[in-house]
């Protein structure tokens, strides 16, 4: 029998298939603060055609966004929209149609390894004071760092009320060794060198619906939300480490992000 801290109950199931979850689950980060217009101009979201938000995403170029591969399984291009410049959960921002979805070829939905995907848009995003791209971290650094930020519309508590506004939270980046030590031995196996972890006080962290969203530090994109023990229970949250995928991103997009 699977126990409550098993990896199978993490973001992979809670994000792309949010409609299959029990009704009434909320849509905010745990322990977060409300964002203001233009605070996170690179924040994007993935939504169904009816405007239901199910995952986060990150603007890296006028025609490209990054998200989690677990957010875009199967032939879903006709059903998904990318929304930029939004604060509200519904009825806000600018909607973009998708030209192509490119999950990492090594994505493993069981282990969450390589849980990252690129999305190419049909029309370019119009940048403004409240909508723009973010620089990518390309240098690997396995160090403790304070003051990282994550944002999204994920649940505030497991089964709590909904929020209509974008949330953000400040987190501490851990070394890989510390991340593995703070997880159970079972889940530590899924903390790969290509991941990056954060941990703050109990009651602060990522939750269902945040998958695919950004982790930033010093103005650069450090990670993409992948999985966690739901939610904010004192275990590290795990992100895909952007520097580990920098070469793949540049190869697929044909762009130079320096």
Image (cartoon, helix red, strand yellow):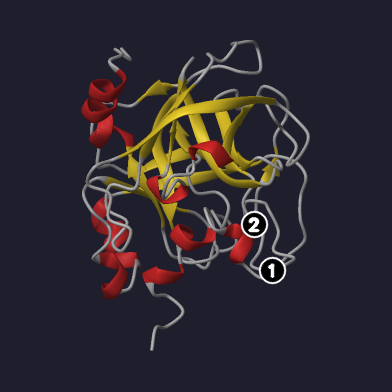
Q: Nearer the viewer, residue 42 or 181?
A: 42
Q: Quadrant of residue 91?
A: top right
Image quarter where the C terminus lies is top left
- Determine the residue located farthest toward the bottom in the rendered image: 1
- Image x and y of residue 12, in percent: 44, 58
Label 1: which residue?
Answer: 159
Label 2: which residue?
Answer: 155
Number of numbered tags placed on the structure image: 2
- Image x and y of residue 18, in percent: 59, 58
Q: Residue at x 62, y 41 (%)?
A: 47
Left or right of 203, for residue 211: left
Q: Is 125 above or below relative to 69? A: above
Image quarter where the N terminus lies is bottom left
> What secondary structure is found at the residue carrying circle 2?
loop
- Image x and y of residue 218, in percent: 44, 26
Q: Is residue 150 visible?
A: no
> What secondary structure is found at the residue carrying circle 1?
loop
Q: Nearer the viewer, residue 102 or 40?
A: 102
Left or right of 141, for residue 90: right
- Image x and y of residue 189, in percent: 23, 65
Crowding at mark 1 (Cα within 10 Å: few <14, some 14-19, many 20+): few
Q: Residue at x 42, y 75 (%)?
A: 5
Q: Is residue 34 visible?
A: yes
Q: Which circle marks residue 207 in the picture?
A: none
Crowding at mark 2 (Cα within 10 Å: few <14, some 14-19, many 20+): many
Q: Are marks 1 and 2 in contact (CB under 8 Å)?
A: yes
Q: Nearer the viewer, residue 208 or 75?
A: 75
């Amino acid at each position: 029998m699977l126990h409550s801290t098993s990896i199978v109950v993490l973001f992979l199931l809670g994000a792309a298939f949010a409609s299959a979850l029990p009704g009434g689950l909320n849509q905010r980060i745990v322990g977060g603060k409300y964002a203001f217009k233009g605070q996170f101009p690179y924040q994007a979201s993935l939504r169904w055609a009816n405007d239901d938000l199910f995952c986060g995403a990150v603007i890296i170029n006028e025609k490209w966004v990054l998200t989690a591969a677990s957010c875009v399984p199967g032939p879903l291009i006709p059903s998904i929209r990318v929304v930029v410049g939004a604060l509200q959960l519904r009825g806000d921002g600018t909607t973009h149609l998708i030209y192509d979805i490119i999950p990492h070829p090594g994505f493993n939905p069981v282990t969450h390894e390589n849980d990252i995907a690129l999305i190419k848009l049909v029309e370019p995003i119009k940048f403004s004071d409240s909508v723009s791209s973010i620089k990518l971290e390309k240098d690997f650094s396995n160090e403790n760092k304070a003051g990282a930020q994550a944002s999204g519309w994920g649940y505030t508590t497991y089964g709590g009320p909904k929020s209509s506004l974008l949330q953000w939270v400040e987190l501490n980046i851990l070394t890989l060794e510390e991340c593995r030590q703070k997880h159970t031995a079972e889940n530590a196996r899924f903390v790969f060198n290509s991941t990056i972890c954060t941990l703050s006080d109990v009651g602060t962290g990522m939750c269902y619906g945040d998958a695919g969203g950004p982790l930033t530090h010093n103005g650069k994109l450090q990670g993409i939300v992948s999985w966690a023990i739901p939610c904010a229970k004192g275990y590290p949250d795990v992100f895909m480490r952007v520097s580990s995928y920098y070469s793949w991103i540049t190869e697929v997009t044909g762009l130079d992000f320096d």
